[in-house]
Image: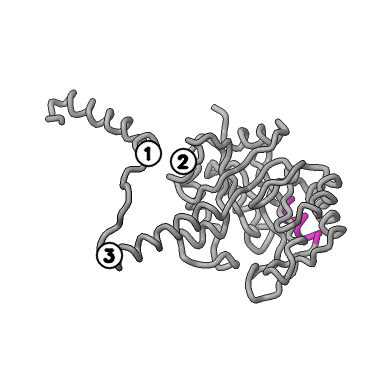
């Protein structure tokens, strides 16, 4: 049986653009698989906000992300890519957490180069190229010959003015991307980079480049996030207000395909067989 990691690696090697659709829970993982997506993605902000009600600025831990990512991957046959933030603070952390991701059966992750606490009021900047290379090297050592996919996230195009750690310098982004590939990354992602910036960066990269949140031509795949968990929260808020104001919620309570999504028939059949064979009453 092909592992999720090998499936993801094969998708990338195939060279045809694909979308890893947002899956922030086991059920939403089953949903994106059921509609035909070949891969799924769990973003850090999606997980931290939806499951723990905390921001994704360094306070959210890899243990918490691993817990949810494992639940999602277990529920699907398609591969899951997880947002691994910085993989901790040291190369030992990077090695340790990479082994945990692999042992949890997750297909791959992306690891970023911003200094913690990231995406916060602290103007953090990026770690040195050498330190990021050592972080990636530690991850590749932990991986060994396992097909687990390591995506290096370069935040150089994610400027301080927008809450990132970069300066928006394309030459620096290209320099970092090449260095991360040299260290052993399988793919690269440059969040917030414009289509114009991608047009300059992608041809210079020796490994595939993906995008975060939106599709762009000539990129390998897209990590699609934000529409799922925010949409669910918006709907919940709207219906909670409706319930508070009117005492009821006007909606169709049927989720099409629910029984298939939760394998209702499988478990019903197991229970029925047990009951019949042991002489118990059945419905």
Which residue carries the number 3 mark?
246
Q: Label 1 neighbourhood size at 10 Å, few (<14), some (14-19), many (20+)?
A: few
Q: Label 2 neighbourhood size at 10 Å, few (<14), some (14-19), many (20+)?
A: many
| Left/right of residue 209 with respect to residue 47 in the rendered view | right
Mark 2 or mark 3: which is in front? 3
Q: Which residues are magenta?
A: 129-137
At x 73% / y 67%, what residue is drawn? 165
Q: Position of residue 121 (x, y in %)?
A: 64, 76
At x 50% / y 36%, what residue is drawn? 35
Q: Where is 269 relative to 143, above or below?
A: above
User: Which label was assigned to residue 256?
Assistant: 1
User: Earlier along the polypeptide chain: callout 3 or callout 1?
Assistant: 3
Q: Where is 281 relative to 160, above or below?
A: above
Quadrant of the snapshot with the N terminus: top right
Quadrant of the snapshot with the C terminus: top left
Q: Are marks 2 and 3 in contact (CB under 8 Å)?
A: no
Q: Secondary structure at mark 3?
A: helix
Q: Position of residue 204 (x, y in %)?
A: 86, 47
Mark 2 or mark 1: which is in front? 1
Distance CA(mark 3)–CA(mark 1): 26 Å
| Left/right of residue 216 with respect to residue 76 in the rendered view | right
Distance CA(mark 2)–CA(mark 3): 31 Å
Mark 3 or mark 1: which is in front? 3
Q: Secondary structure at mark 1?
A: loop
Q: Position of residue 146 (x, y in %)?
A: 64, 37
Q: Is residue 178 visible?
A: no
Q: Secondary structure at mark 2?
A: helix
Distance CA(mark 2)–CA(mark 1): 11 Å
- Give whichever of 59, 26 is nearer the camera: 26
Q: Where is 209 relative to 88, above or below?
A: above
User: Which label was assigned to residue 31?
Assistant: 2
């Amino acid at each position: 049986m092909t592992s999720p990691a090998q499936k993801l690696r094969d998708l990338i090697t195939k060279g045809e653009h694909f979308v890893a659709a947002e899956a922030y829970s086991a059920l939403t993982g089953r949903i994106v698989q059921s509609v035909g997506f070949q891969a799924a993605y769990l973003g850090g902000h999606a997980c931290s906000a939806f499951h723990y009600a905390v921001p994704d600025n360094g306070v959210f831990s890899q243990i918490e992300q691993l817990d949810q990512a494992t639940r999602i991957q277990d529920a699907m046959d398609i591969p899951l890519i997880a947002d691994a933030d910085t993989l901790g603070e040291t190369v030992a952390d990077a090695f340790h957490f990479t082994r945990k991701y692999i042992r949890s059966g997750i297909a791959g992750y992306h690891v970023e180069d911003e200094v913690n606490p990231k995406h916060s009021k602290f103007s953090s900047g990026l770690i040195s190229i050498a330190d990021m290379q050592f972080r990636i090297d530690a991850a590749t050592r932990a991986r060994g010959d396992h097909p687990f996919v390591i995506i290096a996230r370069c935040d150089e195009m994610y400027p301080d003015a927008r809450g990132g750690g970069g300066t928006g310098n394309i030459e620096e982004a290209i320099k970092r991307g090449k260095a991360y590939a040299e260290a052993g990354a399988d793919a690269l992602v440059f969040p917030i980079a414009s289509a114009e910036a991608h047009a300059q960066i992608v041809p210079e990269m020796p490994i595939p480049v993906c995008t975060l949140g939106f599709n762009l031509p000539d990129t390998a795949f897209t990590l699609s996030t934000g529409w799922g968990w925010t949409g669910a929260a918006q709907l919940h808020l709207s219906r909670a207000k409706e319930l508070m104001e009117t005492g009821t919620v006007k909606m169709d309570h049927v989720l099409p395909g629910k029984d298939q999504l939760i394998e209702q028939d499988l478990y019903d059949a197991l229970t029925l067989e047990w009951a019949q064979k042991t002489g118990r009453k059945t419905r």
